[in-house]
Amino acid sequence: MKSLSLIKISLLASVLLSSGYSVTAEAAKGSPAAAASVKSAPTFEPIIAHELSLNISYLLTLNAIDKDAKKIQSPEEAATLYASTEAAIKALGTEDHKAAPKPIYKDVLSLIQFYMGRVPNKDNTAKIKTLGDSLEKSASNFAALTKNTVQQAQALYYVQIGKYIKSDGTDGISDLIPLKDKLKDNKDMVNAIDLMVGYSLASSPSSQAQGLQTMARVNNDVSIFGRLATKLSEAVIEFGLDADGQSVGAIKSTAESKLSYCVQLARAMPAGLQHIVMNSAAYVWVKANPNDDKRSPAFMKDGFPAVVPVDFMRERDALIELRASNYQAASALYKKIASAYQPGPAQSAVDGRIWELDVLQFQKSGSMIDLEASFTALRAKYLPQGKKGFYAMVGDSYRKVLDSNLDAGLSPQGAPAQKTMAIQFATKYLATEQDRTIAYPLKAKLALLYRSQKMFREAVETYLDIAKDQPLKNYVMAIESQSQLASWANIPDFTSKTKDKIPERQKLLSIYETVGSINKNTDWGVISHVGLLNRALGNTKAAEQLWTKTLATNPAHKYANEAAGLMLTEYNTAARHDELIELVHLVVSKKVTPTLKAAPINYKPWLADSLFKAGNAELTKNNLPKAVKYLEEFTIVFPTEPRFASAGHSLALGYKGMNKLVQALNMSKSIAEKFPKYPLRSKLLLQAGEWSAATQPTWEFAFYFYTKYLTDFKTEANIPTIRTTLAELYFKRKLYGWSSRL
């Protein structure tokens, strides 16, 4: 069939982020009205222009030649083989007919495989078309000359593959069908023919079902390219598209899974093959979802660095985010695009956009403009002469002005415009000052001004910067401001469960962790915040590990009690028995009093429950040492617990499994004697009797268990059998009187 029609899409993303202006649809389109309102904002050229297309015919071709094409290792090797092969093609017809014909077409197959697997460009596309013609000619020539009927049939197969390549998948298929009988011993070629025929049938609504059935029948016996072609064909249909990408039906619920399957297979492929698959997948998804405001699924955008169709999908989503004013999300997508490119025009285009946007955020107007411009010009002029003399003097003078402006801004009487001007020009200057000693006094005052203006984000960044010079003091100030952004209490709150302000809390966590490392994690106030922030960010395990480690080394603190209480409560609620048991052991050994809201908690019932359930669970998994350990502790610590008999029974089973027969029998006897109403007592007596009867040294136990059973369970159906078993034991022990009585 013909290659499906292309979508030619050029994306133009104009992002105007500048104080005092808002981005409108008019501005994004570059309307005269918008241009007038943002005269100072730069304009942006389109970043990505790309054509999406359905490349199933490429995949079918790669599948068809997979077995006979040899892998070419390098572009140099390909270029050499291409030149020699083209020369050989030109010489066709001049061969010595007495000599065996050469299968030149096999070299052509290798070249087709190589260039189809490369990232598409005009040169590669042209070569593939030329090679399709070369394949048809060379294979036809070989078929005419060879006397081997098998080789002749295979060559005729590749004649049609050449036609298929030349025609972009429209010719050659019908002529392949008659070759199936001659190729019946070549399963790979027959399956490839069926796959191509199936795809051709599936492309027509009237034979769609038959085509898919044909493809599915051979799907497990073809190459990865064939499987990809099958899944992409299914995706086209399940997304409700016809052969030209037009919507003709509803989208099925399983449609995206077909694309996801293809995408996952493509991840391990070379870049060129990734391009083929992702170009097709993107084509299908975009055609099926023409709404510009629908975001593409994550699997279409994750990974695949520098694969153009994937970058196309990223930028498509970036535009959606921009239209929704989600600038952070859009920026992240642009940065992901840029990160994959090597230095060059493409990378510069994306990075340049990001950089220009960042610069616009610092362009403020005010009364200091002229002075600042003059200072910049002078500084640039004298820089070649060294950072002394006039350069140093003008710097000192300008810093005094900035310092005075900051003092005025910190004054309660300072006007809003004064504060804004002070921040703007101090920030611009400090961005260029590399001498940290010179910059520190200005940065410290600038941070104070940020705080007074409730510009907590900027305050945090400044405090973190100057903390490199004076750590603890400035980290404390950074925490104070970041806590405002994160809506985080200064006093650890072990009852809070809010999970908002995620980015802000991540940053606050990082600062607390830094302070903790300086203090060598000895301050429970800091440790509590680190743990609680981790929990708020969904990393509960990290909080538990930190608190448990600190409880072991520094248990004497009210926050230690709260941390222990919170963990025990959650372990019990979540049935995390192992962790609860270990934590109780630690709490007891360190004399910690677990609390909730400062009230002590009774964790003993929780410990009993965990020991009992974990012990039985480990017994079920045949982890006998651990099961015995837990059940022993249960029987020792909780002798009056209602489940004691059941625990003892399980413990006896554990002892028996570990070949500790005497302990198993003693425990069984104890349970049998102390718990006459234990529901499984009869089973316990029979089990213990069987165990003890197996070896002579424990026959005395057997006498006890069987006698007890006969006494307490006289109406059971197995009484005669037990009576006989016991009599035989007595007889073996030469206790003939006892044996005769039974």
Image (cartoon, rainbow, N blue to C red):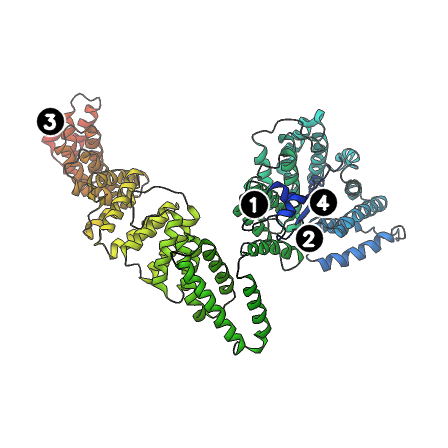
Where's residue 567, x and y in %?
A: 28, 45
Decide which of 492, 572 is in the foreground and name it.
492
Nearest to N terminus: mark 4 or mark 1: 1
Nearest to N terminus: mark 4 or mark 3: 4
Label 2 and label 4: CA atoms lie apart by 11 Å
**What residue is pinned by disc 3?**
741
Decide which of 362, 612 is in the foreground and name it.
362
Secondary element at tag 4: helix
Using a 10 Å C-alpha cutoff, classify the residue at mark 1 as few (fewer than 14 neighbours), some (14 to 19) or many (20 or more). few
**In this image, 188 relative to 542: left or right?**
right
**What residue is pinned by disc 2?**
71
Please identify the quadrant where the N terminus is shown.
top right
Please identify the quadrant where the C terminus is shown.
top left
Q: Please report the residue visible at 41 percent of the width from the left and 65 percent of the height from the top.
A: 468
Q: What amino acid is labelled 3 in the image?
A: Arg
Q: Foreground mark, 1 or 2?
A: 1
Check contact, mark 2 vs mark 4: CB within 8 A: no
Residue 55 seen in the figure: yes
Q: Is residue 350 above or below residue 721?
A: below
Q: Residue furthest right?
A: 94
Secondary element at tag 2: loop
